[in-house]
Amino acid sequence: MRQDYFVFNDFRSLDCNVILSQVKTESTPKRELVFSPVPGRNGDMLQDQKRWGNVKISYSCAIIKEFPAYYQALKNGLYKSTGYHRLEDTIHPDEFRIGAFCEALEPKTARYNQTGTFDVVFNCKPQRFLKSGEIAVCFSEDGSVHNGTAFAALPQITVFGAGAGLLRIGKYSVEIKSITEPLILDCDMQNAYSIGADGGVINQNAEIYAPEFPKLLPGDNTVTWEGDISALEIVPRWWML
C-alpha cells in the first residue's frame, strides 16, 4: 500500500512513522496589486507590484503508534532547520517548493497518548519549481532553449572559455570582460562568480556588464555568443504557480 510523505531539507516524514491523511498543497498565491484613489477621477488607479506573495502549504498528519517517541523525532527533524529550504512530497513527484517551517505543532492525542493527529504547515515561496528545470541544457554552438511554461525563468548559466566574449539569450545580452575559469551567472540572485581551486566562491561581478540578467521567456529563446566563449551550460529553473 502506498504511503505518501513529505521531505523538508532532506528530512523525511516517513522516517517518523507519520501518515499523511490530507494535504492542502494546491493553494495559489495572491498577486500583489495596489489600488489607490485619485482625486477628481472615478475608480482607483491600479499598480501591479509584479510579484506574488507566499502561500501556506499544509499536511494533515497522524502517528498511529508510539506517538511520544515518533513525535519527538519529527520535532527534532523539523525544528533543526531555520530559514527557507527545499520542500517536496510524493503527491507531486515532478515538482518542489522552497519553504520555511514556522508554524506551531498542536497535536490531539488519543489511546493514552499513543496516537495523535496534527497539521504540519510550511510558509512557501509562490513558485512550484519543476524538477525538469534542474536538468542542465548544454551548448557547444548557437541554439535555442524552449520554455513551455507561462512564466519567465531565472536560470543559472555557466560560461566556458578563455578571454572575453558577448553572450546573447533572447533579447538579453551579457558582456564578459574576461573568463579564466568557468563563469557562473545566477540570474535569480543577480550575481556572477566562479569557483576557485580550493572550492571557494570568487566574486566576478566586475568582469561582466549586464543591463539586465537574462530571463528565459515563454516560448523559444535563442542562444548565441561571440568572442572567446566556447560552450554554455544552462540550468533553466522552470516554474509555475
Image (cartoon, helix red, strand yellow):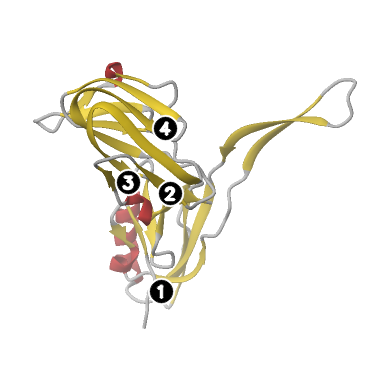
- Residue at horizontal 62%, vertical 45%? 30
Query: Of helix, strand and loop, which one carries label 2?
Result: strand
User: Residue type at mark 2?
Assistant: His
**Callout 3: 10 Å neighbours few (<14), some, many (20+)?**
some
Tell me the quarter of the picture where residue 215 sits: top left
Please state the horizontal and vertical placement of residue 186, each as a whole percent of the image.
34, 33
Which quadrant of the figure contains the N terminus? Answer: bottom left
Q: Is residue 103 above or below residue 222?
A: below
Amino acid carrying label 1: it is Thr
Secondary structure beneath disc 1? Answer: strand
List the residue tagged with mark 4: 214
Where does the image place residue 31, in percent across and percent down from the top left? 62, 42
Q: Hey, what amino acid is under mark 3?
A: Ser
Camera-side residue: 132 or 115?
132
Q: Which residue is mark 3?
A: 81
**Alpha carbon distance from label 2 to label 3:** 36 Å
Residue 115's disc is 1
Which one is earlier in the sequence, the residue at label 1 or at label 3? Answer: 3
